[in-house]
Amino acid sequence: MLTKVRTATLSGIEGYPVTVETDLHSGLPGFHIVGLADTTIKEASKRIKPAIQNCGGTFPGEKVTVNLVPAGRPKEGSHFDLPIALGIIMLGSEVIELEDTAFIGEVSLDGTINGVRGALPLAICLRQAGIRNLVLPLENAAEVSILEDINLLPVAHLRDAAEYVLGIRKLPLYIRKEIERENEESGVDFAQVVGQESVKRAILVGAAGNHGILMMGSPGCGKTMMAKRIPGILPELTYEEKVEITGIYSVAGLLSPEHPIVNQRPFRSPHHNITQTGLIGGGVRPRPGELSLAHRGVLFLDELGEFDARVIDAMRQPVEEGIIRINRNLEEVIFPSKVMMVIAANPCKCGNLWDSRKICTCSAHQLEGYRRKLMGPFADRVDIHIKVNPVEKDNLMQYGETQLTKWMSTAEMREIVCRTRALQAERYRGEAFCCNGQLDEKGIRNYCSLGRESKELMMASYERLGLSMRGYSKILRMARTIADLSESDRIETEHVAEALMYRIDLETK
Amino acid sequence: MEIIIVRKGEPAYPDRLLEIKNPPKQLYCCGNLKLLSSRSVAVIGSRTSTVYGRNTAKSIGRCLAAAGITVVSGMAIGIDTCAHEGALEAGGMTAAVLGCGPDVCYPAENKLLMADIQRKGLIVTEYPPGTPASRYNFPNRNRIISGLCEATVVVQARNRSGALITAELAAEQGRDVFAVPGNIDSQYNLGNNKLIKEGAAPLVCVEDILEHLGISGVSEEDARSRLSDREFQVFEILNQEGEMTVDEVCLKTGFSPAYVTPILSVMEMKGFINSEMGKFFVKITPCK
């Protein structure tokens, strides 16, 4: 006697379909699961037997063998409980047609179905494999409902699922709630940032061209405040992006009933004592790290100087390539990591170096060590470097009185960013990159040509500042964005000049 | 390289040397003769020196040369060499006064430096070609070093260094003497510290000497002629206010950061302003 039930398993943040084959044959009573199952799945044998019995069913008194196909790839997750339990219940019974139905869910000893991690990526791969109906825990229905072309049949108890496969009853379809656009005013707006228009301008350039930003300045001058407002000025997520990000959060187990779907750009701000695994991702069963959780959003590293140097170094390649490769037993797992990097750093260890009213207590040795740590190869890969000064009290008063300078608000800035991004998308149609921040050497050659005058300025700065080739490319990329901001086809001298202001400063280098 | 003899009484003979007690009868020169009468400062010190001393000599050399001052020294190893090197690095002028013939390289390891100075600066000596280096010649040569210069800076000197003789001669000749303060428990600094005790002006930052010479980096006329109107407008405000952040410039002018930032950037490239610690200011001294 043999039954087959379809389900799927996770590999990183992607799923692949698995068929659960259950066979009953004569022999001493026993329950074996084969097919590179991990510990959670092996333990299913201990959960399923009492669960079936507690639902009033009988567990076969002969030898049960469960095989997970394809048998050569590792499988993990407690969501195999439901398909395995159903495979056993179906043995020797009349069942409904299940060719395009798949099952996921974790079973409690009393038969209750619990929610699982990674339901969305599992559903995505099953949909691709031709599955039309998905039986899943009630808890996961909201998150998977982002997929529109698959029938969701949520179940709360093993008995319901059993009665469904045996054709005794039908399961109600999950009714999709309109994904309410969480337009909740988060209460943060760039208009609240007073007297830092030049930094906001740099942030605008960064957001418009997707350049990384490093803000350096004394504590309390508003670096963190501004960083938190950056996701707000980025363009809204597309449907595909929402699915992608929700999938990552699903695997990480970060979705809650209140927020089953990620529909705003992520803002992740890991504490500086984070480990390499926490940031990059990894573990025995690879889980996404902060870099992947910030995918298509902002990764904010506050106090870069406090992070472990090796952790910073490990970020270099993922940030540049936009993906993380992790090799674990038998498999390579790929996590996405396209982030907008926003970094805040103090000018020195005690933070007072630039503050004329305070005294810096760092020794020359400490300053040098701090500088070396900060301005390493990682920071060199961040395009925009900007200094943030505290706003003087007198000026603050003046800002209140005169309305000379207009504060840019989040809404205004977002409009400009969206316009500029659209311009870039149009220009780079058919290219591997979609915004200026991603331009490679070839892209720079093709799209960032300079006029005679701006070339002269470039050459002058080349000599004066001792720019490296990388520094040169960075300035061209930024100049391209600044030109796009003013909707200019050509990169003019003033665009290059502004870009030069956002370079790494030699004095701190 | 051609050796030119400049005799006392000839127009090329520097006036400043005429002011001293026993001016040399003739100078054997190799290189740019104009340097004899240019504004110049002597940067001297011991052969045995510390890293601190050598670095300081180099940056003083660089700073003076960048300001258009000729750096005069004795081409000995140690401090002298560094002073020459600093000047050459900054692309400025430097003159070496030798205690041997103009065609003799002493010390021999400075052969490359000597060639460089000949090409870009000036080699001077009162000894005819072929004269070997001799210890009796050096104290004599020192009076020419101090005599050629408006001021003498002693960077680092041990207790009985020849540099102290030069400083003494400079004082006798009525020229200013600066000494770089040094660590008091290092014997390498005994000489220069003693000079300060005896009344030499301490050189507490490299720019001191320029201030003393009355050289300031950027003049307003220069700025007016080399900057565009919009740039000059921002320059004037910076000049009045001292140091300012970008946002303060915006507040003062009512311009947007997008307008002000490129202007500041270009002025920085043109060498009119400096930025440090996130603030901008008009350059006081043309070197940093």
Image: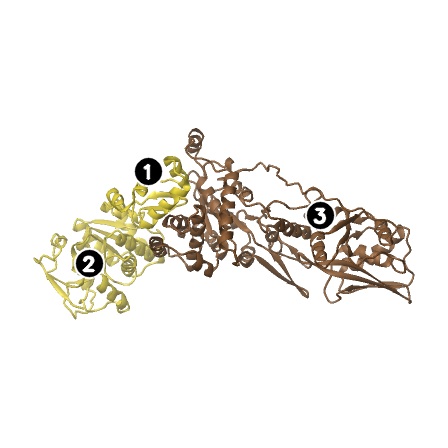
- Say the numbered circle drawn on residue A145: 3
In brown, which chain? Answer: A
Labels 1 and 2 share a subunit: yes
Q: Amino acid at mark 1?
A: Ile
- At horizontal 82% and vertical 50% (from top left) the residue drawn is A108
Q: Amino acid at mark 2?
A: Asn
Along the line of sight, the residue nearer the viewer: B152 or A252? A252
List the residue tagged with mark 1. B237
Along the line of sight, the residue nearer the viewer: A275 or B268? B268
Chain for mark 2?
B
Residue A21 point in image, percent of width and height: 81, 63
Judged from the image, the secondary structure of the residue bearing numbered disc 1 is helix
- Say the numbered circle drawn on residue A210: none
Along the line of sight, the residue nearer the viewer: A384 or B53? A384
Image position of A50 (left or right of B184): right
Q: Amino acid at mark 3?
A: Ser
Q: Which quarter of the picture shows residue A260? A: top right
Chain for mark 3?
A
Of callouts 1 and 2, which one flags the residue occurring earlier in the amino acid sequence?
2
Find the distance from the CA under tag 1 to the CA under tag 2. 47 Å
Nearest to the eye among marks 1 and 2: give it: 1
Residue A53 point in image, percent of width and height: 89, 53
List the residue tagged with mark 2. B142
Q: Is residue A424 above or below residue A18?
A: above
Chain for mark 1?
B
Rendered shade, chain B: yellow
Q: Pick out the residue farthest to the left.
A: B9
Q: Which quarter of the picture shows residue A126? A: bottom right
Image position of A162 (left or right of B45): right
Q: Is residue A504 above or below residue B237?
A: below
